[in-house]
């Protein structure tokens, strides 16, 4: 996993610097990664091919948003995940698989997937204010009660609820239902 991350990140950084050969190699490698990713989740070959192409287009159009200080694969799979969710919603599908069939189960136990999830969460939460970010983490991630968070932050319970609600609404508008994530 680390080897793939290192190779893809290097190719992405080189392509952002204008190296066309690196960019072609990146897109080829990313297409293989995406075929595998979507193939584990979907059965229809045509849908897998369409999602790979949509994701490659999103990678191309959003490449300027990539932060080279962060893992490339976390950025890539965030885009892929949004594309998959959009596809599943549009087709009213629900993903089901046994834990034995889920390769992510092995990654999660090693902490790699968990680290990517935290990085994805941090990236998403950068779009709200620092206060909103801290309250969402306390209430929604850490599972602390509204009263406990209100007491420790010096805010009233209703101020905590309203702030969290508004932040989640903003995130939902930015990343949620009905949006195309490219």
Image: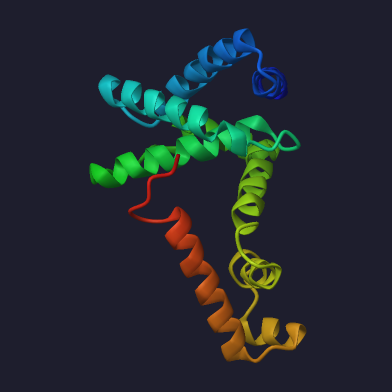
The location of residue 64, given as percent across then percent down, is 60, 34
Of the pair 27 and 85, the residue shown nearer to us:
27
- At 66% from the left edge and 66% from the top edge, which residue is drawn? 133
- At 43% from the left edge and 61% from the top edge, which residue is drawn? 173
Which image quadrant for residue 39? top left
Q: How is the image coloured?
A: rainbow
The location of residue 113, given as percent across then percent down, is 62, 39
**Vertical position of residue 56 compared to residue 126: above or below:** above
Q: Is residue 19 rendered to the left or right of residue 79? A: right
- At 58% from the left edge and 78% from the top edge, which residue is drawn? 163
Q: Is residue 30 rendered to the left or right of residue 53? A: right
**Vertical position of residue 136 compared to residue 125: above or below:** below
Of the pair 59 and 49, the residue shown nearer to us:
59
Residue 164 visible? The answer is yes
Which image quadrant for residue 69? top right
The location of residue 34, given as percent across then percent down, is 47, 24
Name the residue at the front extreme: 18
Name the residue at the left extreme: 91
Name the residue at the top extreme: 21
Quadrant (top left, top right, bottom left, bottom right) of the C terminus? top left
Quadrant (top left, top right, bottom left, bottom right) of the N terminus? top right
């Amino acid at each position: 996993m680390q080897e793939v991350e290192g190779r893809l990140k290097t190719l992405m950084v080189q392509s952002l610097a204008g190296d066309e050969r690196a960019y072609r190699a990146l897109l080829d490698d990313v297409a293989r990664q995406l075929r595998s990713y979507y193939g584990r989740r979907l059965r229809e070959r045509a849908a897998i091919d369409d999602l790979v192409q949509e994701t490659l287009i999103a990678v191309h159009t959003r490449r300027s948003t990539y932060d080279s200080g962060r893992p490339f694969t976390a950025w890539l799979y965030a885009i892929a995940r949004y594309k998959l969710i959009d596809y599943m919603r549009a087709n009213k599908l629900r993903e089901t698989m046994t834990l034995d069939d889920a390769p992510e189960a092995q990654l999660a136990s090693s902490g790699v997937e968990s680290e990517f999830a935290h990085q994805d969460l941090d990236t998403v939460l950068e779009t709200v204010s620092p206060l909103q970010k801290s309250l969402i983490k306390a209430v929604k991630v850490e599972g602390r009660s509204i009263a406990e968070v209100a007491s420790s932050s010096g805010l009233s319970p209703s101020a905590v609820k309203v702030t969290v609600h508004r932040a989640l609404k903003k995130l939902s508008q930015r990343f949620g239902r009905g949006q195309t994530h490219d």
